[in-house]
Amino acid sequence: MTSTNDIRASFLDFFKGEGHAPVPSSPLVPQNDPTLMFVNAGMVPFKNVFTGRESRDYTTATSAQKCVRAGGKHNDLENVGFTARHHTFFEMLGNFSFGDYFKDQAIEHAWTLITKIWGIDPARLTATVYHTDDEAFDLWRKISGLPEDRIIRIAGADNFWSMGDTGPCGPCSELFYDHGDHIPGGPPGSPDEDGDRFVEIWNLVFMQYDQGEDGSRSDLPRPSIDTGMGLERAVAVMQGTHDNFEIDLFRALTEAASELAHTPREGEFKTSLRVIADHVRAGGFLIADGVLPANEGRGYVLRRILRRAIRHAHIAGAKDPILHRLVPVLSGQMGAAYPELVRAQALIEQTLHQEEVRFRQTLDRGLKLLDEQAGDLGEGDTLDGGVAFKLYDTFGFPYDLTEDALKTKGVSVDRSGFDAAMAEQKAAARAAWSGSGSAADETLWFDIAERDGGTEFTGYAADESDGVIIALVRDGAEIEQASAGEDVMILTNQTPFYGESGGQTGDSGTITVQDTASAIVSATSKPLGRLHVHHAKVTEGTLTKGDTAHLSVDAERRTRIRANHSATHLMHAALRRALGEHVTQKGSLVAEERLRFDFSHSHALTPEDIAAIEADVNAQIRGNDTVLTRLMTPDDAIEAGAMALFGEKYGDEVRVLSMGKSDAMDYSVELCGGTHVNALGDIGLFKIIGESAVSSGVRRIEALTGEAARLYLQRQEDRLVEAAGTLKAAPADVPARIAALVDERKRLEKELAEAKKALALGGGAGTGGAAAGPDIETLGRTKFLGQAVEGLDPKSLRGTIDDMKAKLGSGVAAIVAVNEGRASIAVGVTDDLKNEIDAVTLLRKAVGVLGGKGGGGRADMAQGGGPDGAKAGAALTAIREALAS
């Protein structure tokens, strides 16, 4: 038997041999079409090549493209498990020509691969062509030799493909395989064509026209080829079955599910086991491509898929969660072709287990309510829409899950009643918001969110993507257009731009509309916590509501922000390890150039503390562990050890970031919705540059990462080298050289102070005027010794006064120290005179002359000063006059 992996490889190898460039599968989240929920066809990644917006270095290509059809207009969810060929996830094999070859070579390739390489019996094959495509009809007859009755002309949209209302389009030619008359169904175009006997295995699209807005069609200058073959259907043919769930891949998954649920693979629960197998595969690939369960957007589609699988696991009798236990089987079957499954296996398992545990807690109650309300209903009856809404609103049952649960009983659901209940709830929420006192501009955002839903954030996995402009806002009101030079707030249905929140600054970058307009995004905000609003200036052309725009984040800036944010988590953990578990976050700023982190702690960190924290964080960076993300309830996250900010409001689900390892445990586990590095080594380097007090009991650390940290250290080293040059010493000897210079300076300062003191004591009259004798004057009956000295340290005034008093024996001493124009003065009175002469009174007379106020002390010693050092002599004269009077 040829395996699924063999057939996929054989297809790609055949076209590689025919000169086609092998192109890896794109992620399931479209990178170039914001109107699609998921990639749903093999040509989607090449759409811009077909339209001419993008060129590549090849003109022919081949791929095995991952596809999902479980949301929007391409939604096969409700059929999965009940039919032989419907899947939520499937692989589309394709070969493509971008103006290289056309119909003849496309048909030649198809027939050669199918009949000669794979050996499928031509007698079982039937081709269809668009009813007016005589060229394709003739080519099939010539190349394949099929009789004319097995080349069927089909009219209508099924055999004519278009990319949209306008643009490239063309006729199709489909190849069908006949599984035999023992299977019900008829050939294409017959009344019973929907049976399983004749199965389409390959669709060849001949892209040859350009459709205008008026519906007219003109020939494309370079006709192209787009083909799509469902791998699962091709494998079924090759493995001799009409049922996709009987191929080796699905047999492995359904057998594993059967064993885990303790129920036979064939029998009563056959459909449920098939649903489980299909949905685990879809869920695994979506999670591997960055989609996590959520309450809106792509995450909600994933949640619906998983909850449908969980319900069928419940139906099949599984007593415990089983979905996560199927992931190793899936990875073993498909991991070689899609290594992202292997890389993300741990995350897939954790997410599936968590979803199953959570939903099982409400599933029993929800199904009990459904049984109570639908118990008396039979085939052809309808369940009240209000009951369906209660299941959705209270238990998280998607509408289609309720439909699915009633499908086997032939009971339908009143959709209009469900929609009416939903509208009533929204109206009540709108009224509550309007009465909440919120600002008018927030009311505008609420209206937009109610109308269009929240923004789908694609920035966890990508720095750029396309989006549809759903609102333009200026001066608090919506507008239809914004032209060059205007400042405007732009809202798109999806965006890679992170809106400022949780301490992380918002992204900046560009928004462009192909060939018509562009805008510079300076900041991104996040009103209501659901919308990502781009604050922009239109630089060229005119932006119009409804435009498809390309959004590109400033990738270098985001890289720095991500590194700083992840380093903040590591530092938080390091602080708790170094200082104690009382350390909790009190605030943060994560910007492109630095990070700031406030935390609870009573005293300053020592240099040893800072060194230990830096070493701890850098050790985790060198470990280069992958950063893991899980989606959990806040309570479950905190119970699992995640750190959360006290007082912070969290929704019913949070992202939990796990970073690093320490003693086989996660080093850091925190609730966080920000963007982060993929692996800790991406941070590069961590350096603390400041530690200070913010308020009582709160400290602040400022730090750098990556290139900013390296440049900081480089600047520090440059300064060291410069200092070494000045000191004429090697950099390693600078500390010792500086210590020696400091000691020498202290000695010289001491010697200078002693010299100035000696001058004050024995230097003649100085600026004090004439003296009675070389040093001492006699004023009335009192001896006086006064001196003014430049550069004398004010701290030495008291000691100098004591020495001057000792020299006098009996009398009054005064000294003025002048430093940088300012004067400090001290006045002393010997003990025998302090009852007669008050040092404070004399001081204040001098201080007034110096332009100062006050001054104080005791009767025997007083000190003060003033700003006018030029009047030092006059101040001493004022003291003399007071003593002489």
Image (tube, helix red, strand yellow):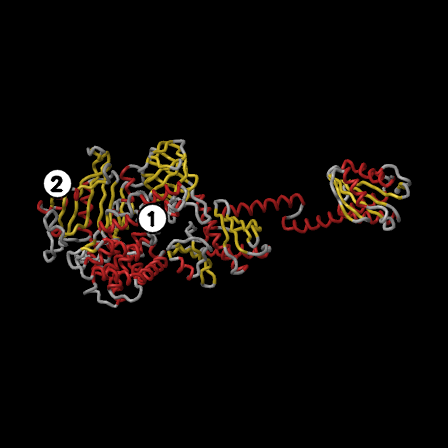
Q: Report which quarter residue 493 is drawn in.
A: top left
Q: Does the rendering let one see residue 710? A: yes
Which is nearer the eye, 32 or 23? 32
> Residue 74's x, y, as percent?
23, 48
**Mark 1 to mark 2 CA distance (whole Å):** 54 Å
| Rendered image: mark on residue 429 | 1
Query: Which quadrant of the rendered structure holds the N terminus?
Result: bottom left
Name the residue rendered at 42%, 62% in the picture: 639
In the image, farthest residue toward the front = 435
- The kind of residue tagged 1 is Ala
Amino acid type of the residue that numbered disc 2 sits on in the rendered structure: His
From the viewer's perspective, is 849 left or right of 187?
Answer: right
Residue 669 image label: none
Residue 592 x/y as whole percent? 48, 45
* Mark 2 closeness class: few <14, some 14–19, many ≥20 residues within 10 Å: some
Q: Quadrant of the C terminus?
A: top right
Residue 169 rendering spot, x and y as whole percentages = 21, 39
> Horizontal placement of 503 versus 753: left or right?
left
Quarter of the image for residue 495 reads top left
Is disc 1 surrounded by few (<14), some (14 to 19) or many (20+) residues within 10 Å?
Answer: few
Determine which residue is flagged by label 2: 131
> Where 815 falls versus 326 (above or below)?
above
Of 177 and 859, nearer the camera is: 859
User: In the structure shown, which secondary structural element does the residue marked by tag 1 occupy?
Assistant: helix
Q: Give x and y (percent) for residue 761.
A: 84, 45
Q: Is residue 868 above or below residue 412?
A: above
**Pick the front one: 29 or 230:** 29
Q: Nearer the viewer, residue 2 or 361?
A: 361
Mark closest to the chain's N terminus, 1 or 2: 2
